[in-house]
Structure formats: C-alpha cells, structure tokens
Amino acid sequence: MLELRNVTKAFGEQVLLEEANLIVEENKVTVLVGKSGEGKTTLFRMIMGLENDYKGQINLSEKSHVGMVFQKYELYPHLTVLNNLVLPQRVVKKTSKAEAYKKSVKILEELGIKYLIDKTIASLSGGEAQRLAIARTLVMDNNIILLDEPTSSLDQENTRNLIELLSNLAKSKTFLIITHDIEFAKEVADFTYAIKDMKIIKHSFI
C-alpha cells in the first residue's frame, strides 16, 4: 500500500500541494485527474524519491517496490528490446545473465510483445514502446506502478489495448495513474481523485 499523509510541496512561493492525503489501495487502479501545472508529475517524482524537499509523509508498506513509466518512456535507444529489460536487472539487482534473459523473455511474452525481442527502440510504435516500458517495471519486481499521462502519445486502438492490459495486470499489481484523459480514466479507474485548491480530493465523473 502507498499512503500520502499531510504532504505539502512548494517551489518558492508557489504551493502545489498543501497537506494532501491519499491512500492507494493494493491491486487497484487509482487515477489522479487534472490539468497540467497542478503538481501531478511532481507528486510522482516525490513518491519515486526524485523530489525530497517536501513536508509530510509518503509511506510504503514493507514489501512495496515502486516503478514509474515516464511519459516519454526513457528507454535505452542503443539497446534492443530484450536488452532494455536485461540491463537494469544485471546492474541494479545483480541478476545472473541467464536468469535476467529468462525473466525478460517471460515478461515480453506475457505482455504480448515477444515478437519485438530483437528490435531497436527506434523501430517501435508508441504502443509497443509503452508496453516495453511497463515490462521494464515488471522485470524489476515492482508491485506499485506509476503511469504518467499514459495515453498522451497513443491512438484509439492502442489506448484500448492499454485499458485491457491494465485490467489484467491490476489483478496482481497496484497502479497510480495521472492523466487529463477523462474517457480513459472512466474506463480504468477503481478510484479517482483530483487536485483542487492544492488538496487531493475524491473525484466523480457524474
């Protein structure tokens, strides 16, 4: 489980969040909707430990590991699809080469992109690159996955594919998504929130 408790974040005199609270339920899809500039991406950076200058608490349960799928995916362009998964396991987790390859192939197969295994990043479509970025969080054994504006570069077909993928993955993974795509949020969210007056509040589409 992921919990924000009385989190306040400011850049100089500009306050983005003020005593914000949020509980992200395990094996659910929680969506935070809102316009650009309201602090949603900054919130993700705080959860990932990339922004530490804030007040309040961001709590993770003992067995939680958080991975983030950035809006631009941040894949390694000089590596193949397979090696984009193998390298972080080898460097960060010190996994053996054989085990890293085995796990990577398994995840690619589960996400339906094993056929891309030897492709370069430049040859991937937006939907394929996104699935690879999600695969990278999975091979690192992250059970809480943050998605930053996941439909921003997807066409309608790939958005539908993403909705189906999230439905399957949420049976065993926890998702926190930030998006301004209201129709997408309606499709995927178990719980929906918005930032209003620097607070995180429950949101209804009605």
Image: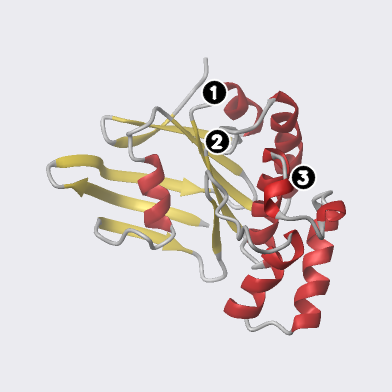
Which label is found at residue 191? 2
The colour scheme applied to this rendered structure is: secondary structure
Q: Residue at x 58, y 56 (%)?
A: 144
Question: In the depicted view, which residue is nearer to us: 64 or 96?
Answer: 96
**Picture coordinates of residue 66, whole percent (x, y):** 53, 61
Q: Is residue 61 above or below residue 90?
A: above
Q: How far, Cα to Cα, is label 2 from label 1?
A: 13 Å
User: Disc 1 marks which residue?
Assistant: 182
Question: In the depicted view, which residue is nearer to us: 169 or 109?
Answer: 109
Q: Of label 2 and label 1, which has the lower sequence position?
A: 1
Determine crowd level at label 3: few under 14, some 14-19, many 20+ residues with C-alpha closer than 10 A: few
**In which quadrant of the rendered view does residue 163 lie?**
top right
Q: Secondary structure at mark 2?
A: strand
User: Disc 3 marks which residue?
Assistant: 168
Q: Is residue 41 above or below residue 104?
A: above
Q: Of label 2 and label 3, which has the lower sequence position?
A: 3
Q: Are marks 2 and 1 in contact (CB under 8 Å)?
A: no
**Picture coordinates of residue 57, whole percent (x, y):** 32, 59
Q: Residue furthest left?
A: 13
**Picture coordinates of residue 70, whole percent (x, y):** 52, 49
Question: In the depicted view, which residue is nearer to us: 173 or 124?
Answer: 124
Determine crowd level at label 1: few under 14, some 14-19, many 20+ residues with C-alpha closer than 10 A: few
